[in-house]
Image: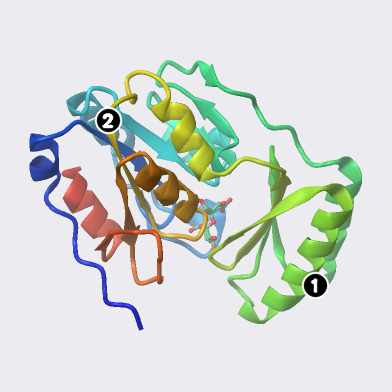
């Protein structure tokens, strides 16, 4: 058993001797998890409060989500922050300018197979611009069957399989949250800062690894075991408190 991780120093203390850049996951970090992707409750004025924090950080704050940016905006409203959606595959700066390429959708034949599988076996399908997610929160016993199917489809169509909480996702090859952190850290206003990645799930570990490689660290949220983080915050409420939202 590994030791529990300590809480991070206060953000004000961290910022006193160095320039910090924050990379924030969305589901399970900034908003509480819910039964379905659309059932989340976004705290009031979340976007405004994040923009105010970004201003205090000289613009060095990015949202980094597994959701597509268009889906984030459906829940949060227009995002005027640096933002990476689609598990880091689609990045844009705070003015909305693209950073890198925009990912394409899945090959239509693979999508048809995924739809049929989801319907036949009782998964909730989340159709995304860059991929397809099989949700099994309502029946955790579906995990193994979903994983075996996803691995086969991924091999057949040259796709990546991403994991999440009660979630198996098929996406185009290549991108991850670490590549998004590196893309932002290569440019202003992020370049030269100490990157801090805050997230609750397995895909966030790529972001934490990149942050550590670039001189920063990760903060794990909740009780999921995390080998890449240096600190822990117990809950979404603790994240909000730490960020001063
Ligand atoms: O990287 P994130 O911003 O954390 O996004 C990861 C996935 O989040 C969503 O799924 C998760 O949250 C749902 C709502 O709380 C929950 O029902 C589900 O069980 C979780 O896995 C989103 O639906 C996915 O598209 C994201 O990839």
Mark 1 and mark 2 in contact? Answer it, CB < 8 Å.
no
Residue 83, percent across and down?
45, 31
Vertical position of residue 1 compared to residue 170: above or below: below
Q: Is residue 113 visible?
A: yes
Per the rendering, the mark at residue 39 is none
Foreground: disc 1 or disc 2:
2
How crowded pointer 1 is (Cα within 10 Å; few <14, some 14-19, many 20+) is rated as few
Q: Secondary structure at mark 1?
A: helix
Residue 63, percent across and down?
41, 37
- Residue that badge 1 annotates: 121
- Residue that badge 2 annotates: 193
Which residue lies at the image location 91% right of the left edge and 46% below the top edge? 109
Residue 27 in the figure: left or right of residue 149: left
Vertical position of residue 21 compared to residue 11: above or below: above
Q: Secondary structure at mark 2?
A: loop
Residue 7 in the figure: left or right of residue 59: left
Quarter of the view holding residue 194: top left
Residue 77, percent across and down?
43, 31
Q: How is the image coloured?
A: rainbow
Which residue lies at the image location 62% right of the left edge and 78% below the top edge? 140
N-terminal of the two: label 1 or label 2?
1
Kindly report the distance in space between the C-alpha atoms of the residues bearing marks 1 and 2.
Answer: 47 Å
Residue 108, percent across and down?
88, 42
State the residue lying farthest toward the right. 109
Which residue lies at the image location 17% right of the left edge and 52% below the top edge? 241
């Amino acid at each position: 058993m590994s030791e529990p991780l300590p809480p991070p120093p206060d953000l004000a203390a961290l910022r006193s001797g160095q320039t910090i850049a924050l990379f924030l996951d969305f589901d399970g970090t900034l908003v509480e998890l819910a039964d379905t992707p659309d059932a989340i409750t976004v705290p009031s004025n979340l976007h405004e409060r994040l923009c105010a924090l970004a201003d205090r950080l000289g613009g060095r704050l990015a949202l980094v989500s597994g959701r597509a940016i268009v889906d984030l905006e459906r829940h949060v409203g227009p995002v005027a922050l640096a933002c990476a959606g689609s598990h880091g595959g689609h990045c844009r700066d705070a003015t909305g300018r693209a950073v890198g390429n925009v990912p394409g959708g899945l090959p239509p034949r693979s999508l048809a197979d995924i739809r049929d599988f989801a319907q036949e076996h009782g998964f909730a399908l989340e159709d995304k611009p860059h991929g397809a997610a099989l949700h099994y929160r309502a029946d955790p016993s579906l995990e193994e069957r979903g994983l075996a199917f996803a691995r086969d489809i991924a091999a057949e169509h040259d796709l990546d399989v991403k994991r999440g909480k009660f979630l198996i996702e098929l996406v185009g090859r290549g991108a991850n949250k670490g590549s998004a952190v590196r893309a932002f850290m290569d440019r202003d206003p992020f370049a030269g800062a100490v990157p801090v990645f805050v997230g609750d799930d397995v895909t966030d570990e790529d972001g934490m690894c990149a942050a550590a490689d670039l001189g920063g660290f990760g903060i794990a949220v909740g009780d999921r075991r995390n080998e890449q983080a240096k600190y822990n915050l117990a809950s979404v409420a603790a994240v909000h408190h730490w960020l001063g939202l």
